[in-house]
Amino acid sequence: MSIAENVKHYLNELAAGNCFHERVTLLAATKTRTPEEINEAIEAGITDIGENKVQEFRDKFDLVRGANRHFIGHLQTNKLKYLVGRTHLIHSLDRDELMSALSAFCEKKGVVQDVLIEVNVGSELSKSGYSYEEAFAAYERAKCAPNLRVRGFMAMLPLAGEEEEKIALVKKMRALFDRAKQGDENITWLSMGMSGDWRLCVAHGANMVRIGTALFGERHYPAKSE
């Protein structure tokens, strides 16, 4: 199937919404994808795209047209200048150092930046993010930080583990999301689910999924020189 056919297929699958009858946003994860591939996906109906690397975000920015730009990767504080004012939503607010630096930079630039609190819900050493136990307090700090607007939470499920364990993690994230949403009208997104697990996440409360391989095919990384 072509990129356009894949996009239409997944948009149709997601049209029914999640288990709470909320609209689910399909975010195309565009790591390593060419501007031509990305534009094909947008023309087929993609409204939101996300990059993992600041350099790719910067290099493709003027070559891609007609979609909300998200940043979904680990963010270094010295790269903020490439994103602030150009990013619809930063998914990876994962530590207090970044919170402080991003708030200060946005205040200096006169920009209000929408962010998601990244949660390491599976307590994996290989992943960044606040622990589940400290995530709500981090949300409250970010909510009070100048020029930041918290729109929800982002998490990734572990690759390994039983389905029941993964369902329990999604339900924990949904409970966190609902707790914040009760007192904050800005809380909108629970960003969970990728090509291999998005159906499980949507079935238990996610309302934004980040899909790359299922839309574009396997990634082809440039060969490293000797």
Image (cartoon, rainbow, N blue to C red):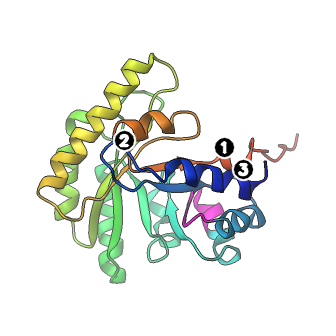
**Distance between mark 1 and mark 3 Cα atoms:** 6 Å
Residue at image mark 2 = 129
**Distance between mark 1 and mark 2 Cα atoms:** 25 Å
> Which tag, 1 or 2, sits closer to the chain's start?
2
Question: CB under 8 Å between callouts 1 and 2?
Answer: no
Q: Amino acid at mark 3?
A: Phe
Q: Amino acid at mark 2?
A: Gly
Residue ranking furthest to the left: 183
Residue ranking furthest to the top: 162
Residue ranking furthest to the bottom: 110
Question: CB under 8 Å between callouts 1 and 3?
Answer: no
Residue at image mark 3 = 216
Residue pictured at 30% horizontal, 70% vertical: 104
Tag nearer the camera, 2 or 3: 3
Residue at image mark 1 = 214
What crowding class fits label 3: few (fewer than 14 Cα within 10 Å), some (14-19), or many (20 or more)? Answer: many
Is residue 71 positioned above or below 103 on the image?
above
Q: Which region is colored magenta?
A: 45-57
Is residue 80 positioned above or below 93 on the image?
below
Residue 205 horizontal/vertical position (percent) = 33, 42
- Asked which secondary structure carries label 2, the reply is loop
Instruction: Answer with the quarter of the image where residue 54 lies.
Output: bottom right
- Asked which secondary structure carries label 1, the reply is helix
Is residue 214 positioned above or below 43 on the image?
above
Q: Is residue 53 magenta?
A: yes
**Distance between mark 2 and mark 3 Cα atoms:** 27 Å
Q: Is residue 86 visible?
A: yes
Residue 51 horizontal/vertical position (percent) = 58, 57
- Asked which secondary structure carries label 3, the reply is helix
Residue pictured at 75% horizontal, 41% vertical: 218
Residue pictured at 19% horizontal, 61% vertical: 143
Left or right: 17 as drawn, with respect to 66: left
